[in-house]
Amino acid sequence: MASGVLLQLNAELADVVARVQRSLVQVHNGRRGSGAGTIWHPDGLVVTNAHVAARRSLLEVTLPDGRTAPARVIAYDEARDLAALNVDAHDLPTVEPGNAKQLQPGQWVMALGHPWGVPGAVTGGVVIGVGSQLPELPPRPHEWIAVSLHMRPGHSGGPLVDVSGRLVGVNTMITGPDVGFAVPVHVVKAFLREAFRV
Amino acid sequence: MADVLKRLSDEMADVVDTAGASVVRVEARRRLPASGIVMAADGVIVTASHVVEREDNIDVGLPGGEAVSAKLVGRDATTDLAVLRAEAGGLTPAAWADMDSLRVGNLALALGRPGRTVQATLGVVSALGAEWRTHAGGKIDRYLQTDVVMYPGFSGGPLVGAGGAVLGLNSSALLPGVSVAVPVATLRGVAESLLAHGRVRRGYLGVGAQPARLPAAVAEQLGQETGLLIVSVEPDSPADKGGLTLGDTVVALAGNAVRHMDDLLAQLGGDVVGTGVPVRIVRGGQVQEAQVVIAERP
């Protein structure tokens, strides 16, 4: 107790969360509540889930500084459950991409979003496993990150980050109160590469 | 002291990696495979009894990726443990933890290998307690509850402490809705008995019984308010041969008071098989003594 490891741990957890919250947006699709989104590029590129975009071409996002702006859906992939939005804003803070392929079971991760509409909330836990053959999952042609934490509706589209605050995935769905799934960051990169040929 | 969070995360992943070398996949049921723990390098695997639904065509997936066939050595449904012998050598046996240093609030990881790779969830030790009995009557040396998530296929896998050693075997069937583990002492004791005898020996009386209140006068005389009312007697069972009949109320066995079913089960361990013990009963309002020779439960 005297060494203060727990206090140090708490401070570091809070630092990571505060940093990542700057790149977390709310996505309003005009229907029930709001989903989340992650700022990918300073010039207004936001990544979220296809199911958050909900087949609409125009959405509204609330940026971390409280500004609300219209967002145009510029790419959409239902199979990967990903969508890319463009917001007319610049110099936005982004999350540094990490490497989901190197994630190990037991590593600490945190998911940010707006569970049940609570803005900017975080839940932490460990990586259960990474792969395309996980129990409980619909067959999809790409990998998933299974995580043991408390994702809820409203976390969808938000960032899943590692202990350094690097983006390893996009929160996408849950199979129970304690198990969530994220689309790995390399799948997001492939989606953006195919959509914009960059 | 910097980067505590990163070091914690890295060490947890290291624990999973190291302990995962002793975690195997157990394919012995139709739906999702479950997990098992390597007990000995020559292929001895301990797993949960409830995940072994078939006794033939059992496969074990090794940490290296190879799948080998395995035979069921024996099982004890009361503690939900089973031992398999896999056709493999050179496996990495699990390291067993010292449970005495474990405290409520300590971190623990549940490991499983329902697929090719090891998987993990994290929790804390929620409760530690004394010896308890499962619904099926099995004796567990201590109560060990955590809040780890039992991901599908984790039954039969280890609960691992911060030191990387195995604290117990996780089973989702022991207490539904609660993550409890069978601690090392019971795990190893039952596994050794299964390896030696193919079964766990337990005493057998041959009665069906339910708790019942004693008449006030008898209760005062004996200093206990309840006993076990016999509602059925198996023909040729120890109880039958000892002259116990329907309507008797058992109040003591071998001099120890019997108030509830647990009191009776606690006295029917493997060590009393074949021994004669006195049974105190209440029959027709009178306290009487009978003698039974405990048999082995079939």
Image (spheres, rainbow, N blue to C red):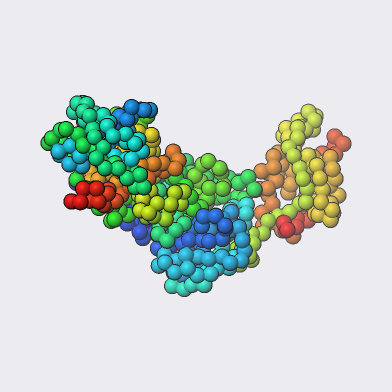
Please identify the residue farthest to the front as the structure is shown.
A57
Q: Is residue B103 left or right of residue A9?
A: right
Quarter of the rendering containing residue A178: top left
Quarter of the rendering containing residue B225: top right
Quarter of the rendering containing residue A21: top left
Q: Is residue B91 left or right of residue A84?
A: right
| Residue at image coords 85%, 37% | B286
Q: Position of residue B94 (x, y in %)?
A: 44, 62
Q: Position of residue B290 (x, y in %)?
A: 82, 48
- Which quarter of the rendered picture does the N terminus of chain A lie within? top left
Relative to B76, is A71 above or below?
above
Relative to A110, is B214 above or below?
above
Q: How many marks?
A: 0
Please identify the residue farthest to the left as the structure is shown.
A91
From the viewer's side, name the closer residue of B60 and B128: B60
Q: Position of residue B82 (x, y in %)?
A: 57, 59
From the viewer's side, name the closer residue of B39 and A81: A81
Decide if residue A102 is in sight here.
yes
| Residue at image coords 56%, 44% | B175
| Residue at image coords 83%, 41% | B248
Q: Position of residue B32 (x, y in %)?
A: 51, 55
Decide if residue B11 is in sight here.
no
Relative to A72, is B246 above or below?
below
From the viewer's side, name the closer residue of B58 and B45: B58
| Residue at image coords 38%, 35% | A152
